[in-house]
Amino acid sequence: MRTVSPTSRLRGRVRVPGDKSASHRAILISALADGESALEGLSRGDDVACTADIVEHLGATVTWSGERLYVTGPPGGLSPSDAPLWCGNSGTTMRLVSGLLAAVPGTHHLAGDPSLSSRPMDRVAEPLERMGASVSGTGERVFAPLTIEGRRPLRAIHYEVPVPSAQVKSALIFAGLGGDGTTVITEATRTRPTTEKMLLEAGVDVVVDESGTGRVVRVRPSRPQPHTWRVPADPSQAAFFVVLGALHNDAEIVVEAIDDAPERVGFLTVLSRMGARLELTPANGGLEVLVRSGELVATDIHSSEIPSVDEVPILAVAAAAATGRSHFRAMAELRLKESDRFAGSLRLAHLLGCEVGSTGDDFWIEGVGSAQRFSHLSIDAGLDHRMVMSSAVAGVSGRGADIEGESTVSSSYPHFFDNLEELTR
Ligand code: S3P
């Protein structure tokens, strides 16, 4: 258990880890290339380490040198491993690797921890089977462990992703690299464009067209070129410190340059609407965020503003400290993350002293008006790093927190508690 104490004053700069999404993709794309790639600024969490171990099992060479990782894809391409491929807690690893392996002939086994084994993989299994791979797991929703029979070439298909999911889109893009023609993937809501952008940088034939609120991605079979990757800082991790600064009663925090893709920084728009005092400055090709204490007011948040909904638990903490009733709408995907974050966000706000309620896929939180009015928090965050970090932010700004499951921050942000403590000095 981790005890977090309330803190009277927070000052300083935070450099959050490298973007987890870009880190996974940099490793996978490099492993597909023929030759050596250099990767800088990677996330050093367990999730990304699983992806690195997997490509090594598939025949890539992976070597750390200081803060740089070198990944060399084998000249003949990746090949199956006899050992099961361990994805840990990481949905991104399991779904993206499934897409990539669908086009690697042979039999592949993928497994994960209990949290990952309860997340549906049918969303990738179904389209990958249409492309000609076989993907089997447990039950109708295809839970891990998974067995994949890869083949090459796969059938190039046209697929409309039925849920807003960057993981599904990306799995199909990776599969499409081994297709027999142009694979066309349509999404109705724009999700993070990390895969498309990075494959373009690696010389792959990907064409992206905006289409209303969504996007169409066309990918032709090809092999990425080796590349030097500089991974930007992770906006979803920055969200914890931005909310901390906004709701704490004596804070001034700078979060150093983060990736500024519009699909990633919707939480900043939400917080501005809530009255958070933010100053955003372009820096190092991204966005630096200065946040100062202020008073927050309730707002209405639709999931399309923050596709992938990773920032909802921490925005629920912001809503808990605000004046008035905040509404979170169309939040079905929140139930399918590392834990049921729909129930978890409501439980967290309730434990902080808020009235809460839900109807269908919507929920509301009646804020207590200030983090200083939070109740002391005692919570089991399960195997969910974002629930741990959200609870810690609430504890530091309010009346403290006792958090079970704290070690799971290692999946995405091993130095989270160190960075938090540095602000109190
Ligand atoms: C991710 C996609 C998201 C997000 C996850 C990372 C990715 O899930 O929750 O943390 O790197 O592609 P969706 O597939 O629901 O968009």
Image (cartoon, grey):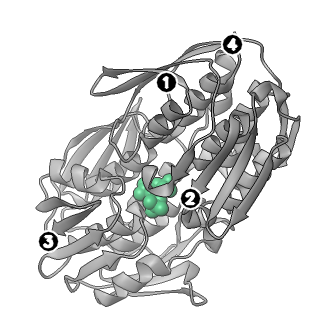
Q: Which residue is mark 2?
A: 329
The mark found on residue 15 in the picture is: 1
- The reply to whether residue 406 is in sight is yes
Task: Give residue 260's position: percent from left, percent from top.
Answer: 34, 36
Q: Are marks 2 and 4 in contact (CB under 8 Å)?
A: no
Q: Nearer the viewer, residue 70 or 264?
A: 264
Q: Is residue 369 left or right of residue 220?
A: right
- Marks 1 and 2, how far apart at CA: 31 Å
Task: Give residue 323's position: percent from left, percent from top.
Answer: 70, 34
Identified by mark 4, the residue type is: Asp
Q: Nearer the viewer, residue 249 or 383?
A: 249
Identified at 52% across, 80% down, the residue is: 146
Identified by mark 1, the residue type is: Arg
Task: Give residue 182's position: percent from left, percent from top.
Answer: 13, 76
* Location of the N terminus (image quadrant): top right
Q: Which residue is mark 3?
A: 221
Identified by mark 3, the residue type is: Pro
* Mark 4 or mark 3, earlier in chain: 3
- Which of labels 2 and 4 is toward the front? 2
